[in-house]
Image (cartoon, rainbow, N blue to C red):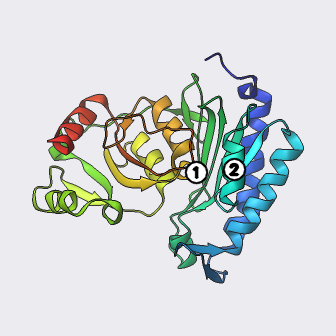
Amino acid sequence: MPKHPFIQEASWQQLKNGIVQLAKTEVLSRFEKVSVETKQDGSLLTEADTQMQLKTQAFLEKNWPEFAFLGEESTTKSQENAMNSQTGCWILDPVDGTSNFAIGIPVYTVSLALMVQGHIVAGLVYDPSRGELFAARQGQGAELNHQPLVAQTAKTALSQCSSIVDFKRLKTDLSIRLVTQAPYASQRSFGSVALDWCWIAAGRGQVYLHGSQNIWDYAAGWLILEEAGGQSQTLDQQTVLLAKVEKRSAIAATTPKLFKEWNNFLQN
């Protein structure tokens, strides 16, 4: 697929600056100051989620009206219509890690991707608490705070690695196997899918496993890891990225060597 014109420098800088400012205003400013609602699926919703989505949608439609909009807090019908847009669509998770955000844990992000013809052509993940902006454009590499981000680690074997594993969404037998036969040195679970992908790209964890994530959770992070040089696939050994509003499993690693060892353990 040829490079999409959106990823030219002027639009890219405008997008990054706009999202960072919105995240500071609509999300960071509300941290530890929010009331919480529970949605029908049991997940949490705060004013930061709703306002960040509303303001971001308005910002995107004003500057790039040719693209449809898919937000986590949109209706299912609206999400499906956006995904089927012929011109492409934005994919937003206004607060990825709402459960953390709602109880005062500073591990949450804003995640935004642009999908065109089934390809993610641009993605960014902004961590307001740390002031870290992870970003990538198709075919142009990944970056962290405007500096090149390359997936690398001094860990050369799975047994040395720190893993990021979400046990809640794994099948019981796999969870038991990981607990009783852990192939890695240590395990973490941070509660923000988008940040998980970015931290794997940055080598802050070296292997990753999640049993069920939505496209707004992983779209931007997936591109960032891909462009940084990391590897990923589903537990069924398919590409994680799928242009549908349906949940996907994900395994990933910082380097191809670690990915092969991690995947071999999970498949055997």
Q: Secondary structure at mark 1?
A: helix
Assign a secondary structure to mark 2.
strand
Residue drawn at (57%, 77%), measured in percent from left and top?
102
Residue 21 versus residue 135 in the image, above or below: below
Residue at (72% x, 61% y) in the render: 24
* The C terminus, quarter of image: top left
x%, y% of residue 221?
Answer: 51, 44
Left or right? Give the position of 187 relative to 110: left
Q: Position of residue 153 (x, y in %)?
A: 31, 37
Going by the numbered disc 1, the residue's amino acid type is Trp
Residue 110 vs residue 237, the one in the foreground: 237
Q: Residue furthest bottom?
A: 35
**Residue 10 placement: quadrant:** top right
Amino acid type, residue under disc 2 in the picture: Leu
Identify the image quadrant of residue 72: bottom right
Q: Earlier in the sequence, mark 1 or mark 2?
A: 2
Residue 242 position in % (x across, y down): 51, 38
**Which dot marks residue 216?**
1
The answer to whether mark 1 and mark 2 are in CB contact below 8 A is: yes
Q: Residue at position x 57%, y 49% from top?
A: 245
Location of mark 2 (residue): 70
